[in-house]
């Protein structure tokens, strides 16, 4: 595949650029650093869009740098970024009940989001949660029944770790609320139009001129297709053994590689 005419690059993280072990430490995959350096050397922008929603982009970037992957603070996006933009556009000033870490709740409050604790919420936003209280889920469900919108950072099963899939607790919490209310969650992370808009505006490049690289057909490749971007599936993670012949043609990636290092000759 030619990539010299691509205006910007969007990478998934886990399963594509790194693997994580039981200690959650990131181990860069072969060629990951070289690919990122090669893109920067060409003068084109890049961003890592993780569906992790428990830390700030700067914290994610620092963690990756500490583990050997050179990433700038401004080169990471999370679903909280697209959620904040979405709320500002669609629900400005509305009280939001947030399921997420204290870091995420604090960031959203600093960005002007009015935090709610129960049925007075007009929006429910579910990010990553380590623990969830059933009473909180019930209050959120009652708010949704009363008309609140249900937003989620992630509604995919999970992401790829060193020893297989790691299930998304945020998706589990979202599913609980959706089940009892019959609501259809609005995804603001990958894959969603909100995420497409966020990555395009962040890079200053139309989505049609981007390349999206990731290991998950249902998440990363779907994100690329939503924006009309070029898509590259990396076999080092979630879709490693997937038979693409069983995937509808419109949902297939434009190119498939075993590891991200294969991109080097295309840059």
Image (spheres, rainbow, N blue to C red):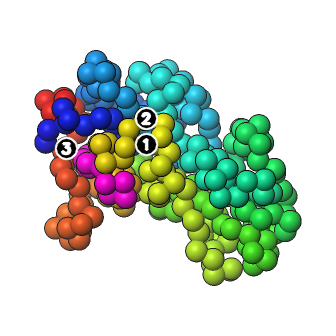
Which labelled disc corresponds to residue 258?
Answer: 3
Q: Is residue 232 magenta?
A: yes
Q: Residue furthest top?
A: 41
Q: Where, quadrant-wise, is the N terminus in this rendering?
A: top left
Vertical placement of residue 251 versus 79, above or below: below
Q: Position of residue 71 (x, y in %)?
A: 44, 24
Question: Residue at (62%, 38%) from the top-left corner?
Answer: 55
- Crowding at mark 2 (Cα within 10 Å: few <14, some 14-19, many 20+): many
Q: Which residue is mark 2?
A: 203
> Does dot 3 land on a helix, a strand or a loop?
loop
Residue 8 located left or right of residue 117:
left
Q: Which residue is mark 1?
A: 200
Which labelled disc corresponds to residue 137?
Answer: none
Start-end of magenta stretch: 225-234
Q: Which one is closest to the eye, mark 1 or mark 3?
A: 1
Residue 162 visible to the viewer:
no
Question: Residue at (77%, 65%) from the top-left corner?
Answer: 122
Task: Indicate which disc, 1 or 3, sits on the residue closer to the N terminus.
Answer: 1
Q: Quadrant of residue 261?
A: top left
Q: Position of residue 94 (x, y in %)?
A: 78, 57
Q: Are marks 1 and 2 in contact (CB under 8 Å)?
A: yes
Q: Position of residue 100 (x, y in %)?
A: 69, 50
Q: Where, quadrant-wise, is the C terminus in this rendering?
A: top left
Question: Residue at (47%, 62%) from the top-left corner?
Answer: 157
């Amino acid at each position: 595949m030619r990539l010299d005419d691509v205006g910007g690059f969007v990478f998934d993280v886990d399963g594509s650029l790194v693997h994580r072990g039981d200690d959650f430490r990131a181990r860069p995959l072969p060629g990951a650093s070289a690919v990122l350096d090669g893109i920067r050397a060409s003068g084109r922008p890049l961003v890592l869009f993780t569906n992790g929603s428990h830390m700030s982009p700067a914290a994610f970037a620092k963690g990756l740098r500490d583990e050997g992957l050179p990433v700038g603070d401004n080169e990471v996006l999370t679903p909280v970024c697209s959620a904040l933009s979405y709320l500002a556009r669609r629900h400005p000033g509305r009280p939001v009940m947030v399921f997420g870490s204290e870091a995420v709740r604090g960031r959203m409050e600093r960005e002007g989001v009015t935090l709610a604790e129960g049925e007075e919420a007009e929006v429910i936003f579910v990010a990553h949660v380590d623990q969830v209280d059933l009473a909180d889920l019930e209050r959120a469900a009652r708010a949704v029944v009363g008309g609140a919108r249900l937003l989620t950072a992630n509604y995919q099963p999970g992401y790829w770790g060193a020893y297989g899939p790691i299930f998304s607790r945020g998706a589990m919490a979202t599913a609980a609320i959706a089940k009892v209310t019959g609501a259809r969650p609005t995804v603001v992370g990958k894959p969603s139009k909100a995420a497409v808009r966020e990555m395009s505006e962040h890079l200053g490049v139309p989505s049609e001129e981007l390349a999206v690289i990731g290991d998950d057909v249902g998440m990363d490749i779907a994100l690329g297709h939503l924006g009309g971007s070029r898509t590259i599936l990396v076999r080092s993670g979630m879709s490693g053994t997937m038979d693409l012949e069983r995937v509808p043609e419109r949902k297939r990636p434009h190119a498939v590689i075993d590891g991200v290092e294969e991109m080097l000759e295309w840059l």
